[in-house]
Amino acid sequence: MKNLLLLSTLTLSLMFSAASSAEWTEVFESAEGDKHYVDFERIRKVNGMVYYWRIQDFLEPGPEGEMSIKVYSKAGCETMRVMPLSLSAYKLPIAVGTATGTWTPDPKWAYAAPDSVAEAELLAVCAH
């Protein structure tokens, strides 16, 4: 019985460690109701670039039933541009549980339009 309890505790802690160990701070809510979070504790600045993790929670499930995505990105704060480096989809909000898919997007810079979600996110990340 003691081993079963230990195994259950270990399994649950591993399942939820990725999302729960991070300190996700909401930085924006879109007009559609999607919420955008950033983990400010894991922001890294290297050679003029800023690397950070973000989560987007969807108000409605996506085409594959995903309720959230977690994205690792690099940003150029002076030019207000961002490039996603890795993206994972999740069936639960705030990227809880196991990713249903992970992929590396094409390496393309996107410039943040004025008054956009991307601009709000970059302003928050770059100010940190």
Image (tube, helix red, strand yellow):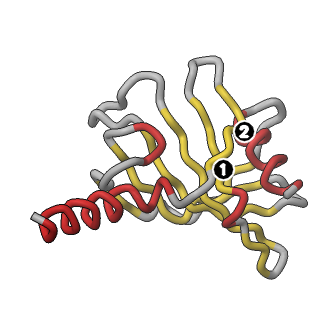
Sequence-wise, the earlier of marks 2 and 1 is: 2
For mark 2, what is the residue? Answer: 27
Residue at position x 57%, y 20% in the image: 33
In screen coordinates, is 39 left or right of 113? left
For mark 1, what is the residue? Answer: 38
Q: Name the amino acid type tagged 1.
A: Val
Mark 2 crowdedness (10 Å alpha carbons): few <14, some 14-19, many ≥20: some
State the image quarter where residue 56 is shown. top right
Mark 1 crowdedness (10 Å alpha carbons): few <14, some 14-19, many ≥20: many
Q: Secondary structure at mark 1?
A: strand
**In the rendered image of this protein, does residue 47 appear above or below residue 93?**
below
Residues at marks 2 and 1, CA–CA distance in whole angstroms: 7 Å
Q: Quadrant of the C terminus?
A: bottom right
Q: Position of residue 5 (x, y in %)?
A: 19, 62
Q: Name the amino acid type tagged 2.
A: Val
Is the residue under label 1 in contact with that under label 2 (CB below 8 Å)?
A: yes
Along the line of sight, which residue is nearer the eye, 87 or 110? Answer: 87
